[in-house]
Amino acid sequence: MNSILGISAFYHDSAACILKDGEIVAAAQEERFTRKKHDPNYPHNAIEFVLNYANLKLNEVDQIVFFEKPFLKFERLLETYVAFAPRGFVSFAKAMPLWIKEKLFQKNFLFNKLKEHDKNYKSDKNIFFSDHHLSHAASAFFPSPFKEAVILTADGVGEWATTTIAVGKDNHLEIKKEIHFPHSLGLLYSAFTYYTGFKVNSGEYKLMGLAPYGTPMYEDKIKQLIDIKDDGTFRLDQRYFNYATGLTMTNRKFDVLFGQKPRNPQNEKITQFHMDIAASIQKVTEDIMINLAKSIRNEFGIKNLCLAGGVALNCVANGKILQKKIFDNIWIQPAAGDAGGSLGAALALWYIDQGNKRSVNPNDDMKGSYLGNEFNQDEIEKNLKSIGANFETFKYEELIDKTAEFLSNEKAIGWFQGRMEFGPRALGARSILGDPRSDKMQKNLNLKVKYRESFRPFAPSVLREDLSEWFDMNVDSPYMLLVANINSKKKMEMTSEQKKLFGIDKLNIKRSEIPAVTHVDYSARIQTVTRNNNNRYYDLISKFNEKTGCPVIVNTSFNVRGEPIVNTPTDAFNCFMGTELDYLIIGNCILDKKKQDQSLKKDYITEFELD
């Protein structure tokens, strides 16, 4: 048996994964263990977890692979500073000490860190380094259900590449084309994330959620920043940006172009201006991704597309590519960001470097992305007793029935079952659930449970067999990475008066039979659920459907704003007691908020740094 440990770290979303004979056994992000969102540090806890899950000691692991090449990244930093000199000296002076101390000699740094896991680990001869974008591409292609595919990767920046096109066939994968730093679609989107007052590398999904409240009236101005060719390739005008050498994303010239300074989230509210800016950059991003998809379909003639990189988490753009029917089939890596780089590096080593044979799974090889921690019933009960929780244990059928009944009565449910998800989406293992038919559920969950902005949309989990009856889509979407519109039969058209409303005023308008998961533009970010990928979650939605005639439930991640998704029963109980969740369903245990010791309540509003 061959085992490979994959590691990604030191920028954001550090993670680890382990393969056994090419099979994905376990993977997790460091943030889930440290409770520090997007934790960029060496993933000590994640590595410990995957080793334990695979029943391996570090000295028994055959190869260890890091997701990018530090020397190439250092070369890019040096060349950038030289090219922009003397601008950027402050940024250069801040970056260099850390590079000289740790990052430049990463093999030695990793070796010393790895020894902390196992005193018998003696040699660094089995440490390898992958290319950042190759890791992304491999994470998208090798687990996919395709024998052959073209892979589009777009993110901020790896070593030099920001956008790459690769072709994969069987166990081969080769990058064919690249766009290089500082020309980056990911950094362009992050610049507008910064400009609208959200946190870079964290708040991009907020910008995407804000976009439907606005109109793309600044599209032409954005196109003054970026020269877009017909094939989707692009160049950014660096006179408007500060990210290459500075400590901010945009500069004064950028502010003058759009007529305002960046929003200060501490004391400035989101206005219609910010909504229109969000709509405009979302439209430009979608157009670029669509044009790239069209050009690579024409050039390579391959019918399957795989997507990876942070931009692949823009599920609205993904949905537009699907809608245009540019490719016959699309598959997106559920951990599309840097966390998934740990998995891609390991898969690239197994298939490309070692030449191992690949067999294609028609569903995919990600196991539903349920690759993280899990707890058996005994462990759950011991944990709950130790923290003073009051709970009742039920047989499976009764547990499902009671939970469905709670949901049908508009109760907010914390749902903790099976293995934790790998990637940023909760997929019915560490989820907060609600009734999509309630016109109060979106606002209540946002303000009373998630403690986040009221405009943020929620996703529907729907039984796969009922998908096309409720949504304008008929392809699998198990990882919540595709957006589609509500089926016209389920829509409630707005009145002429309602259509005149602007921005956030649209939020309280009931737009469909499932208003809690219907965004203001009648769209929804869909998760399809089958018995094959999550039996317990499937049974719950089926029982809810039995009781209500609705095969859809609200699914959002089990956390509050600024907190990573819960990992352990203790994390789940703390979040339950720090929010206005009504029930916590964990394993076969049901916890009623009214029956808990009130002295165990948590101050969750100030517990975590806002993202």
Image (cartoon, grey):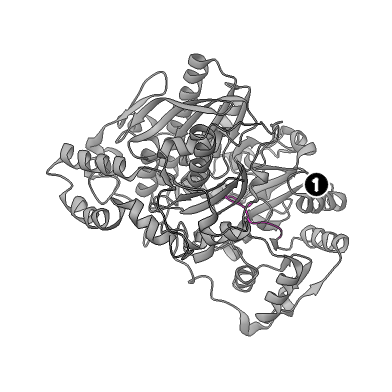
Identify the residue at image location x=57%, y=56%: 50
Q: Is residue 284 above or below residue 371?
A: above
Asked whether residue 61 is in view, the answer is: yes
Please name the residue shown 31% across and 35% down the image.
Answer: 181
User: Which quarter of the picture shows residue 77?
Assistant: top left
Callout 1 secondary element: loop
Residue at coordinates 49% horizontally, 53% vertically from top-left?
15
Label 1 environment density (alpha carbons within 10 Å; few <14, some 14–19, many ≥20): many
Dominant secondary structure of the residues highlighted in magenta in the image: loop
Using the rendered image of the protein, determine whether residue 264 is visible from the camera's viewpoint: no
Q: Is residue 283 above or below residue 586?
A: above
Residue 578, given in percent of the width and then of the height, sits at 59, 72
Please give left or right for residue 108 compared with residue 540 in the image. left
Left/right placement of residue 566 relative to residue 383 reads left
Check the picture and name the quadrant holding the C terminus: bottom left
Taking depth in this image into account, of 607 and 132 the one nearest to the observer is 132
289 on left or right of 587: left
x, y percent for residue 194: 36, 49
Q: Position of residue 197 (x, y in %)?
A: 38, 52
Give residue 548's position: percent from left, percent from top.
84, 51
- In terms of depth relative to the viewer, which is nearer, 350 or 558? 350
Amino acid residing under circle 1: Cys
- In the picture, measured across the screen, residue 325 lies left or right of residue 528, that is left
As drawn, which residue projects farthest toward the left?
Answer: 86
Q: Which residues are magenta?
A: 417-426
Q: Which residue is mark 1?
A: 550
User: Between 440 and 348, which is closer to the camera in this rendering?
Assistant: 348
Q: Tell me, yes or no, whether the highlighted magenta stretch contains residue 393.
A: no
